[in-house]
Image (tube, rainbow, N blue to C red):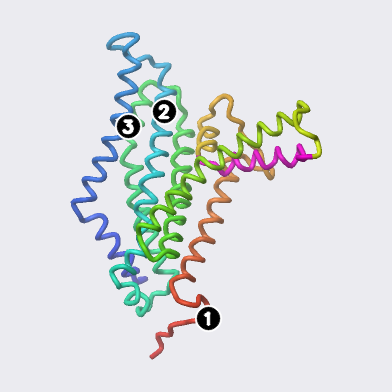
Amino acid sequence: MAEINPVLLKELRQRFRTGKTAWLLALYLLVIGAFVLGFMYLSWRGSPGIFQPDRSRSLFIMLSVTQLVLLGFVVPGLTAGVISGERERQTLNVLLTTRLTPRQIIWSKLVSACAFVVLLVVATLPLYSIVFMYGGIAPAQVLGVFGFYLVTIFLFGCIGVACSSFFKRTGVSTVTTYGLAFALAAGTGFLAVFLHEMNRLQARGGISPETWHPAFLAWVVEFLQDINPVFVLMQILGENGIPTGVNFGLPGWAVYTLVSLAAGVLLLHWSARLLLPGGKRRRITMDV
């Protein structure tokens, strides 16, 4: 039987056996539940006491977008201090003298934080049952949305761990993590819209044709949409007016998944190298 990673076991116990965990879970469900009930109440105002079944799709979209926004706040907050907090408590050097490798320490911190976020997402399943009561949503769409959440949690978690490994102070790491998450969610979307408008102006003759190559500019716009979590979520939901995107011969959600997983693995590898001064040049051997 394989030995359980002691750091992972300790982190899981600390996260799931404290009263703060129950309060955070309750607050998370309260916020999402308030949005759902508020949406249903506004839908009732046209016909008091009656919820229109054709609004179930709008309810599903609102619920999915709200959960994405909350994940953008929760995941960076849980991961931005996992390593810098150890430095501030002066316990990181103790971890580095154990038999665990820096990569194992990084993965333990990431898995424990992401496991709690996955619990938050799974806990919202009863809210999605309200949508199924009225129909209009395919089960494949719900599975696609939850798969998208898992990839996004992994990406945001890797960004938080990387910032926590690079910066010595948790405050600086937290601000940087939120900034990068905002740049990914809003910055890429804004840039995609800006370049799309540039392409349209160029096609109408408002900009010199030599300024931008139309095919390359269109590819960049599509790629930015494929790595933007908001655009990808809208593509999964099948919203009208949102291009489905086919880049590299792959749909938008596949490009987003591959890019996110590759970026996350690289960030974790870089974070592991940052744990020891000098990176690969300095090794701690446990043979003695």
User: Could you say where residue 154 lies in the image, as x and y percent from the top left?
Assistant: 45, 52
Kindly identify the residue that appears in the image at 53 percent across and 51 percent down.
260
The residue to which callout 1 is attached is 281
Kindly identify the residue that appears in the image at 61 percent across and 31 percent down.
243
Magenta residues (range): 211-229
Q: Main secondary structure of the magenta part?
A: helix
Is residue 132 located in the magenta-colored stretch of the structure? Answer: no
Q: Are marks 2 and 3 in contact (CB under 8 Å)?
A: no
Q: Is residue 270 left or right of residue 110?
A: right
User: Could you say where residue 189 lies in the image, as x and y percent from the top left?
Assistant: 56, 38
Is residue 227 located in the magenta-colored stretch of the structure? Answer: yes
Amino acid type for the residue under numbered disc 1? Arg
User: Could you say where residue 161 lies in the image, as x and y percent from the top left?
Assistant: 42, 60
Amino acid type for the residue under numbered disc 3? Leu
Kindly identify the residue that appears in the image at 43 percent across and 83 percent down.
284
Q: Are marks 3 and 1 in contact (CB under 8 Å)?
A: no
The residue to which callout 2 is attached is 60
In which quadrant of the rendered image does the N terminus lie?
A: bottom left
At numbered mark 2, what does the secondary structure look like: helix, strand or loop?
helix
Q: Which numbered disc, 1 or 2, marks the residue closer to the eye?
A: 1
The residue to which callout 3 is attached is 127
Which numbered disc flags the more N-terminal residue, 3 or 1?
A: 3
In-front residue for pair 109/145: 109
